[in-house]
Image (cartoon, rainbow, N blue to C red):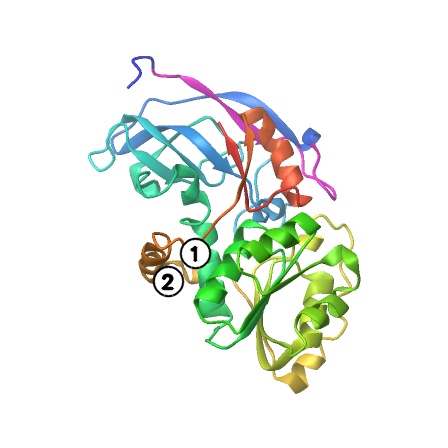
Amino acid sequence: MSTTRPTTTRAVHLASRPHGAPTEDNFRIEEISLPELSDGQILVANDVMSVDPYMRGRMNDVKSYVPPFHIDRPLDGGAVGTVIESRSEDIPEGSHVSHQLGWREHAVLNAGDAHIIDTDIAPASAYLSVLGMTGLTAYAGLTRAAEMKAGDAVFVSGAAGAVGSMVGQLARLLGASRVIGSAGTDAKVARLRELGFDAAFNYHDGPSTELLGQAAPDGIDVYYDNVGGDHLEAAIDHLNIDGRVAMCGAISQYNSVEPPCAPRNLALAIGKRLTLRGFVIAKYAEEVRPEFQQRMAEWLPADEIHWDETFRDGLDAAPQAFIDMLDGANTGKMLVRL
């Protein structure tokens, strides 16, 4: 371990609340102090941090399922790093851990708020995607919120993103009769086919309802929604009787300053007996985690699951990485190496 213990670190603060799409002016990098550790605390040098769509909602001062970020204070989010100082018997120095104090180069936190990860099984960054909350969200959304069963035809929007790409692969492994995905570029569509999707379309090629109808001529039974808007409207058009929707995100409207008009066909849900269920992973995490971990322990060694990562380097790149992620610049998980 290094003999020089840092007393300060750099962190990204929220400088102002975005109106519409965020810009770099909404962020500011500042130096903050690192207090001496109390009993039960650890000091982590962050190696990789995550930028995620849900963080956009936290930049608004509105009540939600997670508290909003505060102006002139550091942002936070998923990160993995190396423990460089410890006053906890549970997490010794040298351990690799995951935690929720990202957006900074170092973090002081209670040992109970960190989880030791095994970097012999997978790279540390995987614990922010396939083996972390991303994978768990995909699995819980399919198996619990959407109540997917073998033989279902499954459509996932934002399918080349971190959660969406996992949803499609998990649906296939769980016995879906057909897996369809939407993405924003032809290259991403090609990647979805490589990942085992039966059909995929570029939503820029025409109305989503027409493109989905071509990809799923017999309709769909499950829609995993990461986009909202016209994608949700298209899914309602093509859902079969007793179809289910797991509403995970609505990235198409995160930067909107006006409320969306879609879906305009919601009345179809009555005759089709549809279930539209919004969810957040906190509802299912503890129940689902052991089952998810057991299945991933089988699928990963068998090379059944693949995941993509898009990296940017350095804390200074984090704000633009977040902005670019909202614009769809990533394939798989958008991560920042620190």
Comes first in the chain, label 2 or label 1: 1
Asked if marks 2 and 1 touch (Cβ < 8 Å), the reply is: yes
Residue 63: give x, y in percent of width and height.
Answer: 59, 53
* Magenta-highlighted residues: 5-23
Res 72 → quadrant: top right
Relative to 273, residue 125 above or below = above
Query: Mark 1 = which residue?
Result: 136
Which amino acid, mark 1?
A: Leu
Q: Judge whether 47 appears above or below 299 on screen.
A: above
Task: Give the residue displayed 54% in from the left and 27% down from the top.
Answer: 313
- Gap between marks 2 and 1 measured at Cα: 8 Å
Q: Is residue 163 magenta?
A: no
| Amino acid type assigned to the residue bearing label 2 in the image | Val
Residue drawn at x 46%, y 41% is 78
Q: Residue 14 colored magenta?
A: yes
216 displayed left or right of 30 = right
Secondary structure at numbered mark 1: helix
Disc 1 packing (10 Å; few <14; some 14–19; many ≥20): many
